[in-house]
Amino acid sequence: MRVVLAAAAITAIEASHANPISKVLDLLAGLRSKVVADGETEQKSYEEFAKWCKTESTEKKFEIEDGRNQVDSLTATIEKAAATISELDSKIEKLTSAVNQNEKDLDAATTVRHKEHDDYLATDKEMVEAIDTLERAIGVLEKALKKGSSLIQAVKTPEMQKLTQSLSVILDAGVFGTNDKTKLSAFLQSHEESEDSLGQAPEAAAYETHDGSSSILDLLGDMLDKAESQKAEADKAEMTSRFEYEKVKQSLTDQIAFDNKQLDAARKGLAAQREVKATSEGDLETTQKELNEDIKSDAETHDDCEKRAEEWDVSMHERAQGIEAL
């Protein structure tokens, strides 16, 4: 501005040597008009710049505020996802442990059930054989006695001879108690002695039981009743055991299925939350970077606008002085 005024002054002085005073005044007036016009142009330019500064500041502050809100929102999302992931990890661990334990319990119950069933089959086989043997022995004896045969003659029939061998096997079975086995053993031993003595032993003495029971038929009948009773109890126990096992099996199977369903949902939820967390962390990094750039840009724009305003104030002051001097 000072250079312009100085140049104008030099031009006016040179004109004063070559032209009349009126020309000097005209030049100064023209110079003043030019300075005023340049000032108006510069002011218009500055006003547009100032308006841009205000608009840019407003928009940038909005972007910064929006960026901070996004950062807060993304941070909250990440923290929530992290908490949910921790809960799901714990839930999955507990469910996995529960499923494993229930599967072990089911395997153990199945193993016990199989053993119980095997034991039942073995015992039931002995009982069925014992019952069959006793029923046939009683039938043979009763049939022979009804025909008028003596007890000695009845036990010496071929059919009874075979049954005697089967009755001997009962002594090794675990179906009957010691007392019954002792009585049966006494009968079998008496039968063998009667055969050895060719019927010389007294019939009543040979076939009476040691504790005063009426006859061998009473003994066999009593043993048959006990065998049938024990079989009925064993069948009932087997049925109860099977029912209890099926109930436990169903309960454990249902619980395992339910826990596996919960486990599957938890694993899917965990995968989803991990994806949310990873995506949010990536978005947060980008948003934070953009926010930092906006803050930096806003600060730089503010400094530029402040500097331009100071320069404008100086220029306006100098222009006013120049116009006053002209």
Image: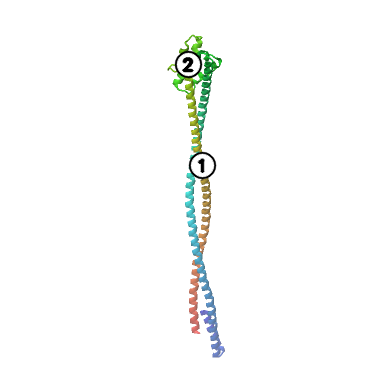
Residue 187, numbered circle: 2
Mark 1 or mark 2, which is nearer the start of the sequence?
A: 2
Tell me whether circle 2 and circle 1 mark residues in contact (CB < 8 Å). no
Q: Amino acid at mark 1?
A: Asp
Q: Nearer the viewer, residue 226 or 271?
A: 226
Above-or-below relation of 184 to 305: above
- Closer mark to the observer between disc 2 and disc 1: 2
Above-or-below relation of 34 to 67: below
What is the crowding at mark 1: few (fewer than 14 residues within 10 Å), some, or many (at least 20)? few
Residue at image point 52% right, 60% down: 287
Above-or-below relation of 153 to 41: above
Residue 27: where, in percent of width, then height?
A: 55, 86
Residue 104 seen from this side: no
**Secondary structure state at the residue bearing disc 1:** helix
Q: Nearer the viewer, residue 282 or 252?
A: 252
Q: Nearer the viewer, residue 163 or 97?
A: 163
Residue 175: where, in percent of width, then height?
A: 48, 24
Residue 71: where, in percent of width, then height?
A: 49, 59
Residue 58 seen from this side: yes
Residue 315: where, in percent of width, then height?
A: 50, 77
Mark 2 and mark 1: Cα distance apart in space: 57 Å
* Residue position marked by numbered label 1 in the rendering: 254
**Secondary structure state at the residue bearing disc 2:** helix
Q: Amino acid at mark 2?
A: Phe
What is the crowding at mark 2: few (fewer than 14 residues within 10 Å), some, or many (at least 20)? many
* In the image, farthest residue toward the left: 211
* In the image, farthest residue toward the right: 18
